[in-house]
Amino acid sequence: MSKYILRRALGLIPTMFIIVTICFFFIRLAPGGPFSSEKKIDPQILKNIEAKYHLDEPLVVQYVRYLGNVVRGDLGPSYKYKDYDVNFYIGKSLPKSLLLGSLALFFAVIMGMGAGMLSSLRQNTWVDYLSMSVAVIGISVPLFVIGPVFMYIFAIKLDILPTSGWIDEQGLKALIIPVFSLSLAYFATVARLSRASFLEALRSDYVRTARAKGLKASVIMFKHVLKGASLPVVSYLGPAFSGIITGSIVIEQIFRIPGLGRHFVQSAFNRDYTMIMGTVIVYSLILVLMNFLVDVIYGYLDPRISYK
Amino acid sequence: MNNDAILKVDGLKTYFNTDDGIVKAVDGVSFELRKGETLGIVGESGSGKSVTNLSLMKLIPSPPGKIMEGTAILDGKIDILKMNEAQMRELRGNKIAMIFQDPMTSLNPFLRISTQMIETVILHKKMSKKDALKKAIEMLDLVGIPNPEKRVFDYPHQFSGGMRQRVMIAMALSCDPEILIADEPTSALDVTIQAQILELIQALSKRLGTAVIMITHDLGVVAGMCDYVVVMYAGRLVERGTNDEIFDDPKHPYTQGLIKSVPRLDKPDVGRLFSIEGQPPNVIDLPECCPFHPRCNKAMDKCRTTTPAVTILENNREVRCFLYEGEK
């Protein structure tokens, strides 16, 4: 098992290398550059700036230089915000996005699995229909609708929660609406997924055996059903976590949260090459790490999977 | 009849409510089981043999299934069918244990054998975890699993099919049940393993004094190990008797057909193997008739319009056929 983990961990390196390479060349295919603006810049000044950032060198040289910096953990200076480098901006905004995303995913999984469990136990009753209807709404309504609707209800009409802002200005209350809005779609997916897998497990032969042994329904649910039924949810967690972190872009805009998502979007508009690269590296690192983690957890949950 | 019956089932009816109508999966089945005896229930797929036994454990999925009427008296005292869920839990795995057809899926693939075995003993016998584990190892040894003190910590997928069925048997017998219901315990196994498993069930039931209800469609299994035989067709009992009576002198045309359809190596070759023409009937909204009449070579006019009642012959043999009406 530890051998497998080591091998998988080493396998992350080429994956990241390919991502960095593709991204590096692709963003340079887009028209314009970090210093092109509507205002005409003196060609000599432009030349000086480009020389400062090594943009006048051949692309391959730039690429090798960048790769060297990334390996040393330096994501380079931002071309747009000249006071600090990319590392600084990511270090400041990533924890906020991570906190927001983790909380949202946590609620999505706990509530989703709870709803899925209830639905499967009360299949085709009002409990089932109600939670699955909520799930359908959660999947179909986009974030940019849910966010403002919650904001309108809880912040403006009921006036019990702040409309926007982050913990530093509003306290923990500021988290409630963003976390809840962000988690809804994931709650819905988890609920539907787990309902199906709970139903399958409840009808399985081994649950019949457990019932024939005289076990209580609660023991059967938590000891015999939960482990197997949580597998599809676990495999969904990897993409869900990276999705929720990147998905928080919209939420961060709506609720004025200084997270990484804002930099991700802004840097693309600005052609801020290093910032784009930095955010892409962070996001893809989260994605590959989560998938890796899920595979490892999977191996612990399902004894039939043996890693060699 | 005999008073020493540990289980006496009378007029059991289990129906399923489906969109197409009411499925009378079990429609008036009666039998008795005595201590240490092995009862075979034979029938084709869909004849209601499994539902009969799931009804005795009250494990019928409900809805759509429902036990409509009947009694099942255990130890001459309590009626299982009138018990509530909490009382049933006391009974399941403790007084009546069950093993199933497919040992590949009947064990939980996510839990160690030890976990699955000790939970029954801890629940019903109030043993400590340590004693329960000792008991589990003892039982695995008894069913012939080599190296049980190590293998008890394995997962189901680390055992072969036959070994898994041994584990199921060990688990089922670990609370010393009075009755073991074996629902086609060998149908999913290789022929060579089948014989081993059947011998094991037989030997252990003798040794522990457990009565066995053997559900099967394999007449060879019945002939080899059952004391009494119940033949079922379309949810109803069609014939009941001792092993010798059923095999030497089958009364019902269906039983006669079944026995003729078994290939025999001990009899001279008689050419093409006999088979009963046609299909079993659909048990949804079955009209008043003998359900076997379309396939019966002795069918009379009466069989098409009236449902035959059970006739009791000498030595308490039962047969549901007009041919024996008025005989005793």
Image (cartoon, rainbow, N blue to C red):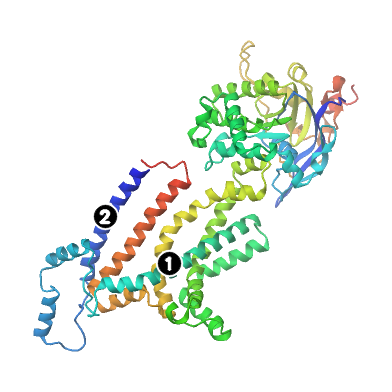
Sort mark 2 into few (<14), some (14-19) or many (20+) by Cα contacts within 10 Å: few
Question: Which chain does the residue under circle 1 lie in?
Answer: A
Residue at left offset 45%, top offset 58%: A237
Residue at left offset 26%, top offset 61%: A19
User: Quarter holding the C terminus of chain A?
Assistant: top left
Counting residues from the start of the chain, the first of labels 2 and 1 encountered is 2
Q: Does residue B283 appear in the picture of this structure? A: no
**Residue holding disc 2:** A13
Q: Quadrant of residue B114?
A: top right
Q: Secondary structure at mark 2?
A: helix
Compared to residue A153, the image places residue B7 above or below, namely: above
Sort mark 1 into few (<14), some (14-19) or many (20+) by Cα contacts within 10 Å: many
Q: Secondary structure at mark 1?
A: helix
Q: Quadrant of residue A47?
A: bottom left
**Residue holding disc 1:** A244
User: Distance of mark 2 from mark 1, alpha carbons?
Assistant: 24 Å
Q: Amino acid at mark 1?
A: Ile
